[in-house]
Image: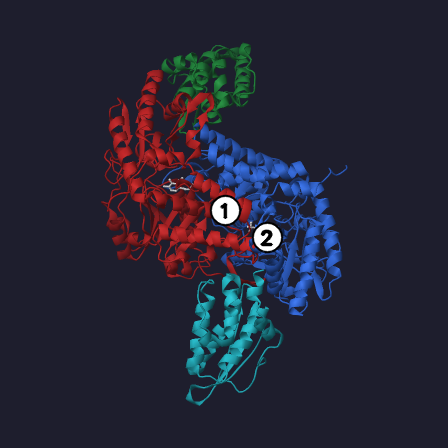
Chain colours: A cyan, B green, C blue, D red
Amino acid sequence: MIAESMYQELILEHYKHPQGRGLREPFDAEVHHVNPTCGDEVTLRVKLGDGGKVLDVSYDGQGCSISQAAASVLHELATGSTIEESLSVVDEFTRLMQGRGQVEADEDVLGDAVAFAGVAKFPARVKCALLSWMAYKDAVLRSQA
Amino acid sequence: MIAESMYQELILEHYKHPQGRGLREPFDAEVHHVNPTCGDEVTLRVKLGDGGKVLDVSYDGQGCSISQAAASVLHELATGSTIEESLSVVDEFTRLMQGRGQVEADEDVLGDAVAFAGVAKFPARVKCALLSWMAYKDAVLRSQA
Amino acid sequence: MSVPSFDVERVRKDFPILSRELPGGRPLVYLDSGNSSQKPAQVIDTMREHLAQHYGNVGRALHALGSESTEAYEAARDKIAAFVGASSRDEIVFTKNASEAINLVAYAFGNPINTDERFRVGPGDEIVITEMEHHSNIVPWQLLAQRTGATLRWFSVTDEGRLSLDNLDELVNERTKIVSIVHQSNVLGTVNSISPILARVREVGALMMIDASQSVPHQRVDVADLDVDFVAFTGHKMLGPSGIGVLWGRRELLEAMPPFLGGGEMIEAVWMDHSTYAPVPHKFEAGTPPIVEAVGLGAAVDYLTSIGMDAIKQHERELTGYTLDALGEIPGLRIVGPRTVIARGGTVSFTLEGIHPHDVGQILDDVFGIAVRVGHHCARPLHLRFGIPATTRASFYLYNTTAEVDALVRGLHHVQKVFG
Amino acid sequence: MSVPSFDVERVRKDFPILSRELPGGRPLVYLDSGNSSQKPAQVIDTMREHLAQHYGNVGRALHALGSESTEAYEAARDKIAAFVGASSRDEIVFTKNASEAINLVAYAFGNPINTDERFRVGPGDEIVITEMEHHSNIVPWQLLAQRTGATLRWFSVTDEGRLSLDNLDELVNERTKIVSIVHQSNVLGTVNSISPILARVREVGALMMIDASQSVPHQRVDVADLDVDFVAFTGHKMLGPSGIGVLWGRRELLEAMPPFLGGGEMIEAVWMDHSTYAPVPHKFEAGTPPIVEAVGLGAAVDYLTSIGMDAIKQHERELTGYTLDALGEIPGLRIVGPRTVIARGGTVSFTLEGIHPHDVGQILDDVFGIAVRVGHHCARPLHLRFGIPATTRASFYLYNTTAEVDALVRGLHHVQKVFG
Ligand SMILES: Cc1ncc(COP(=O)(O)O)c(C=O)c1O
Ligand SMILES: Cc1ncc(COP(=O)(O)O)c(C=O)c1O
């Protein structure tokens, strides 16, 4: 039962009880990302503060449990951290997801996001997990531009 | 050795010593037929006389032994017979050639042309055997038009 | 005529993959034949035998292997012509798939080389499709419209998943050059009635094409009965291998069309500055064709015929009725497409409230070994029409059983438990 | 670097067909690999195994079989990319054969949808090919010229069967949009030197395509070394199955080109009135691709690599030298093409004085089981150039032996006796 390794309790928890969902004001940048192959969508806003702080990551979207839970975990990890820290988490998460299940996850960096390790074995689902994370990276870049 | 059944002595004899080869005057119609897949060509003339007599079938061309021998045999069979007779030989020959080796040849009608029976088993060579015979039919039609 | 007796367990034995165990000891429950069908040993063995003992290039070679391959390849054409009731074997063009077959026809239109009025297309001319098409019967026509400035129009789909013909007379009119319509929808299962549309097409002097990719595998399709101008279908959905598709076309039209792909075997004679072309169907078969694939498809057609298309249709109809009933019991499950077995095939798409099809498909596969397809099934506009990004689809073939439908139902209950 | 040891008898054991007996008890002497090659058990078994145990449609399916098929299909792309030294797997487009690959590029030119200057073609523009091309690298360009009003021009061939570059600077000029040239001639065996032509092509800012159908199977071909823009080749000539071909193209160009065939899998998103397209290579792979065929070609490439392309080239070179010497002894035999092994492959075409190639081929086959090809080998203009309607061609591959060449020579003596 391979699925057990993909649908971790923590993922289902975030899916059923998404954290920080909903679009909020104020924000510095808003992006809209789509995964055309499955129709998953996310609209995501970031609000940055002094000292490179991430004050808020707010989002709305539709998609599978993986994409929804990934957005929720992203919200938790990024909000309150610094831009730099959060982007290094994004990088590590991307490396894990694109590793085809061969990459060892760095739990210290990833925190809860390590629960997605099982998704990496399913190439078709990797994009779901990455959707909001890529949107976040994009939004941060735009806020700084 | 399947070939033995195709390259009958009689075919080789006609190939090495073609009968009535060369384009002659007078003539009522001249046609030029080509087999584009192998490049075989024949130019053929007919001269018809009173009472539906075929006075001469003269031809020139290039091609394989089958196409050359078939033209030579055609010359022998058609020259001196009547149009009607010769066309019925053409029909029987065509039937034999297109019979994929399943058709019993009528020796009474075909005469020497029965030697080509083995060719019918080789779909790629049937066109070679028929080239001059089709040209003859065409030429007769044109002379009568 | 009574339908020959049909023994699904005996049929299943012919398909080696059906006794395969998936990783983790899951049995395979294959409910994705609308995507691509599995292959019986008869097809696999024919292909292996051909490759191992009879292979040579076709058409060009005079030697023993060349003749054997040519005969096998052309015999496959005969079989397929007979299978779909073509009046001549020369009306069967082998392509690599249904998509190429449709593109072949689309590229015949508005081609500057063309000299036939029926294939002339420019601004003001119209092309008509439907909202329930597979992308393979949408994009080729969009590209044609873009190349020529013609206008693409379409029939809409009702809430029940049927074609709406309300505006038939307006939609198909004097400006229409071609109408191309799916015979059986790969999402809804709907089998479209061709004749009312065809009558109007003939009235206005347009041409008509049928995308029969989902009908030829599952029911007796007779191109003479259909009486349209072009029919496309694809080998891999009808027990044949990948890499082979079929275009049937009226000989007279195929002859009038300009060539599509240029190259070896489609020519009569070539000079550096011009060429003349082979008679149909070879005019449309440039280069070395999918030889072993055509031979495999011939074996598939033999197999289907030996079972009997009527028996297959009847079996799938029973499965479909059983499935519609069973799924109807599941709370929050919404079937997208006709809810009765009338004028529909064995393809059932649905949504589960609050659960994304990707999650449905993944749990079904991972936990139960049930292979369904999830997503828009290459029919995104149809999903947009229903306001949903994706569906879960179960699609049946002659080797499926009611026990497999039961497994699907159990699996869906489990999915609801996980995500409930 | 020393060439790995090559044991032709061991190689022959891998090809089941080579131990086949033809009707009448004739052994098979297969000298027609230039037409299509035979397949090793490794390829046949890989295909059978895939069909029997792992088959599913690719790309679209999330389930176990779909994943296995997708992985096998995409792994084949990796293998082929590595085999020809492509800098990215995304530069490998699967087609049905080399002919489709060439047509795909030809249709990118002069397409109203195209917006890239390099692919704009109209009256006054020029396309350059050569007199030694296979019809598959002639007709697509003739059709392009006819569609657009452009002019087709060509390099001529010398009496020795080499490309004449005398008028290179005049032929390839500022009006030239693309130059498409065969790498190894399928008739003459000539291997063309690409770099002098490429240098001129770059000078004038045109694009360059190579038809490598006869080189990729027989020597190490590295697309990065070649440094041209497009390379086409075909699976069935390199131990792979029928139904699969390859287009390699520079990614940047593939991205700039308009789509060719429209349909499933080549899209990003589809609306009724427009579509966006998938990234390369999928943009050019509409519909269900030749899945099992790509997997088979992957196995073929593994097999070729395991033997070693340098060893194969060396073996064929020895056979060719042996053949040129042996045929040189036969009175009335005229070789059409280079008479030395320098810059030529293992394809030897010839005429026998006074005897038509059809008769030569038929006797060789019927009496001795020797399969050669006779005719114009899909290169009619080249034959016109030499003033002959047809030739007899022996073409070698890794599994051929000098004993088979001896059989050919004996056979030719017999032919001369029969028709002498
Ligand atoms: C030089 C050359 N180019 C192109 C082709 C066409 O290949 P295919 O028939 O696989 O399309 C061939 C072989 O037939 C060839 O020898
Ligand atoms: C209705 C319909 N049309 C066309 C196609 C395209 O067939 P192929 O992928 O073989 O080109 C499919 C299947 O994918 C289909 O279901």
The x and y percentages for residue C264 are 43, 39
Which quadrant of the structure image shows residue C417? bottom right
Disc 2: which residue = C35
Question: Nearest the camera: B47 or C107?
Answer: C107
The amino acid pointed to by label 1 is Val
Please state the chain letter of the residue tagged with numbered disc 2 in the rendered image.
C
In what element is the residue under mark 1?
helix
Asked whether residue C196 is in view, the answer is no
**Hey, which residue is sitting farthest bottom in the picture?**
A50
Against C210, residue A14 (above or below) is: below
Question: Nearest the camera: B8 or C28?
Answer: C28
Which quadrant of the structure image shows residue D396? top left
Q: Which mark is residue D35?
A: none
10 Å crowding of disc 2: few (<14), some (14-19), many (20+) = many
Asked whether residue D182 is in view, the answer is yes
Against A17, residue B3 (above or below) is: above
Disc 1: which residue = D292
**Cβ at disc 1 under 8 Å from ligand 2:** no
Please state the chain letter of the residue tagged with numbered disc 1 in the rendered image.
D
Quadrant location of the N terminus of chain C?
Answer: top right
Quadrant location of the C terminus of chain C?
Answer: bottom right
**Hey, which residue is sitting farthest front in the picture?**
C25
Q: Which residue is depicted at the point 46% across and 23% down? A: B131
**Cβ at disc 2 under 8 Å from ligand 2:** yes
The amino acid pointed to by label 2 is Asn
The x and y percentages for residue D77 are 43, 52
Q: Which residue is depicted at the point 46% across and 27% down? A: B124
- Marks 1/2: CA–CA distance: 15 Å
10 Å crowding of disc 1: few (<14), some (14-19), many (20+) = many
Q: Quadrant of ligand 1?
A: top left
